[in-house]
Amino acid sequence: MILIASAMEGELEPFIGGLHDKQTDFWRGYQIYSGFFEGHNALLACTGTGKVQTALVLQHLFDSYPIQGLIYCGIAGALNPAYHIGDLVICRDCLQHDMDGSLSGSEPGYIPGTEIGTLVSDNSFYERGVTFKPAGYRLYSGRVLTGDKFVKDFKERESLRKNLFGDIVEMEGAAAAICAHINDIPWLIVRCISDQADGKFPKRFKNFLSKASLRNMEFVRHVLKKTG
């Protein structure tokens, strides 16, 4: 079973529309969809915004369903100046930019008392993903930085780029990756660029979100078609 997850319902809408033999379940207010997507037994779920909700929901799903892979989709802000709004970015690796245990001797992004810090995407998912050929926009591979805050200040943006070598910034990816890593589940993150991490979102944001979600779905379809 493949789990396709996003933070917001709008990021998951086209996937829900493309699900065959759809069934709906609920867990503590969270809606969960199951069925078939691109011929694969699939589970779709919105985790909510931020690292805590993401880890909470994903761990429940990993405990409750026979999940064999996770693809986390959504939007993100660009730190890399080469990225433009509407481009897709596949996660090469990720870390929590707001995890700072330096007083205990940990490196930035690493959870004190563990070896969990920078996590690398599952190689099989990643290799399939980089063969995707989008039309009308670009596909990049980059480092995802995750934190429980919107990044909109120029100095902070430049610091994340310079010190942590981040390419995009968002609020769930590293939490999803850590949860999948601990549960030994292959994972991949894909994000559509919605802004330049400057607090300025596209006008008619709902229309943009719909377009971004369709682009994410095109990518996921490609990956799943190449997945046995």
Image: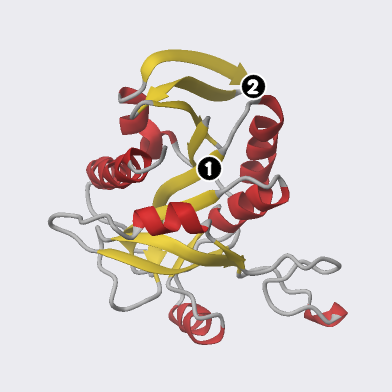
Q: Where does the image place residue 202, in percent across and percent down from the top left?
A: 26, 56
State the CA–CA distance, disc 2 to disc 1. 19 Å
In front of the other: 18 or 163: 18
What's the residue type where badge 2 is placed? Trp
The 10 Å Cα crowd at callout 1, few under 14, some 14 to 19, many 20 or more, is many
Where 123 sits versus 216, above or below? below
Left-right relation of 60 to 166: right
The 10 Å Cα crowd at callout 2, few under 14, some 14 to 19, many 20 or more, is few
- Residue sticking out furthest to the front: 228
Where 228 sits versus 77, above or below? above
Where 91 sits versus 153, above or below? above
**In this view, the mark in front (2 or 1):** 1
Left-right relation of 31 to 37: right
Q: Residue at x 24, y 58 (%)?
A: 86
Left-right relation of 35 to 182: left
Residue to which mark 1 is pinned:
70
Occupied quadrant, residue 101: bottom right
Q: Which residue is drawn at 63% across and 26% down?
A: 65
In which quadrant is the C terminus drawn? top left
Residue to which mark 2 is pinned:
27
Q: Where does the image place residue 46, in percent across and percent down from the top left?
A: 51, 34
Q: Residue 105 carries which label?
A: none
